Image: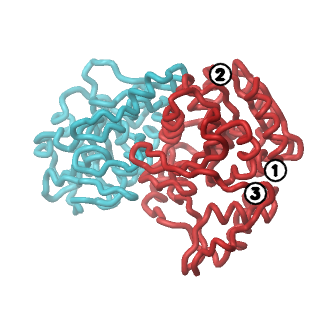
Chain colours: A red, B cyan
Amino acid sequence: MVRDVSVEPKYLGTVPPERRWNFLSFGLRLNILEWGDPQAEPLVMTHGMWDHARSFAGFAPLLAEQFRVVALDARGHGDSEWADNYSWFVDVMDLVGLMRSFGKPVFLLGHSKGGGQATDAARLAPECVKRLINIDGFGPPEMDDLRSPPLIMADVLDRRRKMRSSWRRYANLDELAERRNAQNPRLTSEWLRYFSFHGATCNEEGWTWKSDPNMAVGYGPWRPDWIGPSYAFVSMPMLAIIGSEEDTWGPLPPAILEERLSRIPNLIRYTVPGAGHFVHIEQPHATADVVMDFLRQ
Amino acid sequence: MVIRCGRLDLEVHTLAERPGTPLLLLHGLFGSSADWGDIASTWPGPVRGLDFAGHGGSAWTKGGAYYPELFVADADAVLGRLGSAYVAGAGLGAYVALLLAGARPNAVPAALLLPGNGLDGGGAAPNWARGSEYLLQASSTEPATGYDPMVRTLGGDPRPPDYARAYADAASNLLLVEDGSARPPWWEAVSQSSKARIINGNSSEALTLLADLPGASQPASAA
């Protein structure tokens, strides 16, 4: 089975990236996609966990009319290299390094985990970020595992002893898209086929995700109640976007979201009607409109 | 001996080879197994010294991700070969020894925690106010001798006292070596655990006390 580009699924409104280049971060090759005039002001975009930069292909072109949109495949995702190990901090450092490479402050947008990392990058390197947009990346509501840390750590160690080097393989693209549908029940099958095609690779044995399965094996003292206090140190204007509809991930329960966002000194909030967690994919035009308004201020 | 941990090859030094229960030594930040000198001579059994990832003879982590729990996985890979082992750690290695002893209480009869480089980490809680200056310092790729420059990021990881205490309470036995100097909050919390015993003296004397604990001198095979 050889991947045939002629079978690339089409999805209305998506535009292939106009440029593709590599950014070297701590010895790791990261894949960068671009839309828009290279002389325009950079708008850096970073995606969420198990996602990839190409999933901005329906949203980025709407902003590329005015900005140089630069979308990053995070390490271990999409067409970026796999690392030996992963940490939140080096993901954030990748973002900071990429922003610094432009030699001037940029606009920064992140979705889900990418939204949380974009917010951390903006807090740690405020001189790099003019304005920040976080799309439903405000962290989990609480710890998803309430056992004692050493018990969780023992499980993590057991899993690391059995680390796998690849995902299972699927017979065809439809099976892969169906698997993803379990995580993204609000997204259409047409979108999931488009997403899966660009997030997977194929050989004689079938289709498998490009992302590194070992990214899921990690643990530490981090806890959700650290998120709110960190937001107090976000110094630039921030646009916080959520969707109006409940989804597998987000939006957070209102009281928790309020508590966290109330710490941000210079905040604009917007709820996009008719969207779940993947706000910019479900409602790209409405999301682009509010982002454009925010960036023009 | 080289062992595989995930995608990394780690150097494990045989510092003593004799019958008895194994002792695993975990060095401090920026160090290596060479830092232990001839301490192995005081242990009544085989002694192994692990070079953490990014240190000594072990591989550097491609992409530069380092945090203490990853070093726990390094040490756990050696523990898996040994079956069970007493563990002694200095500085960062002491913190790693604590986490390993708490996560693997049946395989670590006791752990000895010694002062050394990288003991404090980034304090009891994250410092949200720190910004670019910290970032530049932590991610400096200025070459270093004997370690990956990216292990400098280990100077800033938060080590909450309640997190450390949970590992202490889950461990079988802990010996903490005091010398009168200041200790970080996580150490103070661990010292309050019923599993912890405070001792004074140098590392060789402390190892002798560790060896006097039940089971330390029982014959066992080592990898």
Residue hosting label 3? A184
Residues at marks 2 and 3 on the same chain: yes
Q: Which residue is mark 1?
A: A282
Q: Quadrant of residue A194?
A: bottom right
Q: Are marks 2 and 1 on the same chain?
A: yes
Residue B192 seen in the figure: no
Measure how far apart labels 1 and 3 are at the Cα level. 11 Å
Whether residue A137 is visible to the viewer of this picture, yes or no, is yes
Q: Earlier in the sequence, mark 2 or mark 3?
A: 3
In the rendered structure, the answer to whether residue A30 lies left or right of residue A242 reads left
CA gap, disc 2 and disc 3: 32 Å
| Residue B223 occupies quadrant | bottom left
Amino acid under disc 3: Asn
Chain letter of disc 3 in the image: A
Which residue is more in the foreground, A271 or A66? A66
* B173 lies above or below A154: above
Q: Tag 2, which secondary structure?
A: loop
Q: Mark 3, residues whose alpha carbon is within 10 Å: few (<14), some, or many (≥20)?
A: some
Dot 1 and dot 3 residues touching (CB under 8 Å): no
